[in-house]
Amino acid sequence: MTISSYDEVRFSAISENLKVIRENIGNSAVSAGRKPEDIRLMAVTKTVDVKYINYSIDCCGVDLIGENKVQEYLSKKEFLPLEKIEKHLIGHLQTNKVKKIVGEVDMIQSADSPRLCKAISDESGKICKICPVLLEVNIGGEDSKTGFDEGAFVDSLEEISQLPNITVKGLMTIPPISDVTAVLERYFDKMNEYFHTLKEKNLKNFDLQILSMGMSGDYELAVKHGSNLVRIGSSIYGARNYNI
Ligand SMILES: *Cc1c(COP(=O)(O)O)cnc(C)c1O
């Protein structure tokens, strides 16, 4: 691989960004009386060229990546050091693509309907595996977003707990965009409450450990309100260019 001076600049920006983000996560954790090491950092790599992803893995200690699209992940994976990382799907998954991704990633964070959970369980069963998933909750009840609506979520839990080839490892959310801290805090607190209530239910096939919330714009707040996995893209790799 030839490295241009443009790449050098990008590499050092990625390294610096990760340093700052880790510091910020640590500070938020401590200010909330939590341990920095209890919070995992996911690098969201959608639209990012593999050379930058690999730099962040090989030189900056990234050990968890998230991709949104099945096809994009599959076309990148042969160029990634897969043995060094955990890979999660975080984007909306269509039922007809389930077959392609089950067995390829370590977790599906975007399980957003009982039908999709069943499809994931069925496909995992065919390859004799159990697929870890997070249930995605549409906590703001927005029409434009995927994820369980709150009512559907509560009503579906029993049915989901009967699926033999998934384990529900936790919850994921993308709250509505807001500049108002108090509004975001309310959504994060609500998710945190769901997470703890659900934990106490001890449902079959549920092993709740992960509360995935917080992105570039709001991860510090999310950590203060219970998140233990933040998903960060543009603050690490720079603004996304969807045209490449
Ligand atoms: C793109 C994306 C992120 C990261 O977004 P940034 O604002 O770039 O940090 C996190 N989670 C999901 C589900 C995403 O699609």
Image (cartoon, rainbow, N blue to C red):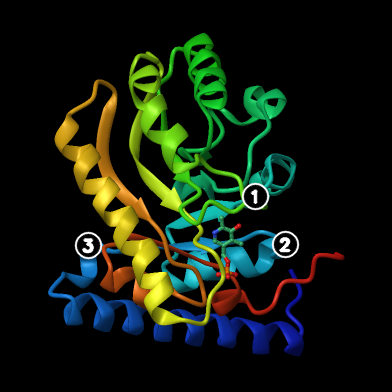
- Give the left or right position of residue 22, taking residue 54 as reference: left
SS under mark 2 = loop
Q: Position of residue 45 (x, y in %)?
A: 61, 61
Q: Is residue 174 visible?
A: yes
> Number of marks in the image?
3
Residue identified by numbered label 1: 143
| Residue 38, disc | 3
Residue 169 sits above or below residue 35 on the image: above
SS under mark 1 = loop
Q: Label 3 is placed on what type of residue?
A: Asp
- Give the left or right position of residue 86, taking residue 89 as reference: left
Q: Label 2 is placed on what type of residue?
A: Thr
Q: Position of residue 203 (x, y in %)?
A: 23, 25
Counting residues from the N terminus, which is met first, the one under dot 3 or under dot 2? Answer: 3
Residue identified by numbered label 2: 47
- Give the left or right position of residue 177, taking residue 173 as reference: right
Disc 1 to disc 2: CB gap under 8 Å = no
Q: CA distance from mark 1 to mark 2?
A: 25 Å
Mark 1 lies within 8 Å of ligand 1 (Cβ measured): no
SS under mark 3 = helix
Q: Residue at x 42, y 58 (%)?
A: 63
Disc 3 crowd rating (10 Å Cα; few below 14, some 14-19, many 20+) is: few
Looking at the rendered image, the quarter that the C terminus falls into is bottom right
